[in-house]
Image (cartoon, rainbow, N blue to C red):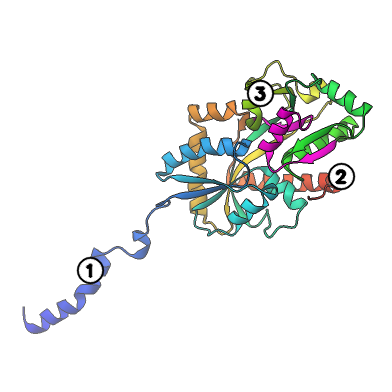
Amino acid sequence: MNALARSLLTALLPASLLLFGLPNPASAQAPYPDRQIHMIIPLAVGSAVDSAARVLAKSMADDLGQSIYLENVPGSAGLIGAERVAKASADGYTLGAFNDSVLTMVPNIHKTKWDPLTDFVPVSLVGTIEWGLVVAANSPYRTVDDFIKAAKARPKALNYGSGGSGSPQHLAMVMFANQAGIEVTHVPYKGATPAAIAVASGEVEAAFQGLGTVVPLIASGRLRLLAVSTEKRLSQYPEVPTVAQAALPDFFFNSWFALVAPKGTSDQVVERLYASVSTALKDPDISKKLEAQGMTLRGTTPTEFSAALKDQYSRYQRIIQTNQIRGE
């Protein structure tokens, strides 16, 4: 090889290595996820969503090959935690485990720094949390009709607990009271769990609660489940009537456990997360655990969840405006 040929080969060598020997930036990028995921729960420890999120996150972590760190950020009926998710980087490493109150109730009551319909990317409506009307185990009210009759006899004298103004517990009782024609006094707490404990201890007389929150208190004999707010009786409590069967035809209420990501999260990341949710819900052990918490599994696609979110937002907007529900 003469000197000219050697100089040409040397000049072309870096380019040939780039083309044939080295990966380009796109192919070198690590597949998602390549580090720990942060899941923010804007609700108290022990709430229905918190309990379900802990079951789901463990399965998702196994599927995704990365740990998931769960952080409870309660307060202001979920506003504080939701804002953390809305302002997080849209890289798939911060997720929100929300109930429908955060997305469809509270934003219709409080002015928020984020828009529930545009500042989050729907991942999946994981499941619906079934609800029921509970009283303390030593309460004189043994049926829904007992409670309604007492409330009618003493307007505003009976009180009920909720997780805060605009929380699902609040709206459920407002809807119940409207249909029953009663007036009861609202006592807001900082989360669903404190409200449930308040009922068990006798601080307040009743509450609508997601079953995932109150199952331990029912099982330990501290709460009595008067009725479930489902369309049909639940297999977990076959002896417990629905509210519709007990007193109020057509009464129905449940809430959501849903996963969202910050606005701008890529379709590829959202699809990977949705696939992980789907894998988890197909696991018999996971489904059994979630169903035992009073959850009906859904696992909707991001598109289906987006449509459900818009529909429920409008529905609760009408209820909140009609009943003039205000924030604390």
Q: Secondary structure at mark 1?
A: helix
Q: Is residue 286 magenta?
A: no
First to last magenta residue range: 185-211
Q: Which residue is rendered at x = 49% and y = 42% of the image? A: 275
Please state the horizontal and vertical placement of residue 125, each as a whole percent of the image: 61, 41
Callout 3: SS: helix
Residue 228 appears in the rendering: no
- Which numbered dot is residue 218? 3
Which residue is depicted at the point 91% across and 32% down? 181
Residue 229 appears left or right of 286 = right
Q: Which residue is mark 1?
A: 17
Mark 2–mark 1 distance (CA, rounded to whole Å): 70 Å
Q: How many marks?
A: 3
Q: Is the residue under label 1 in contact with that under label 3 (CB below 8 Å)?
A: no
Quickly name the residue at label 2.
Answer: 323
Give the image location of residue 225, x and y in percent.
72, 23
Residue type for callout 3: Ile
Determine crowd level at label 2: few under 14, some 14-19, many 20+ residues with C-alpha closer than 10 A: few
- Using the rendered view, name the quadrant where residue 229 is placed: top right
Give the label, 3 or 1, closer to the camera: 3
Compare marks 2 and 1 and give the one earlier in the sequence: 1
Q: Are marks 2 and 1 in contact (CB under 8 Å)?
A: no
Question: Of the residues shown, which amino acid type is indicated by label 1?
Answer: Leu
Give the image location of residue 283, x and y in percent.
48, 30
Dot 1 crowding, Cα within 10 Å, few <14, some 14–19, many 20+: few
Looking at the image, residue 249 lies above or below residue 7: above
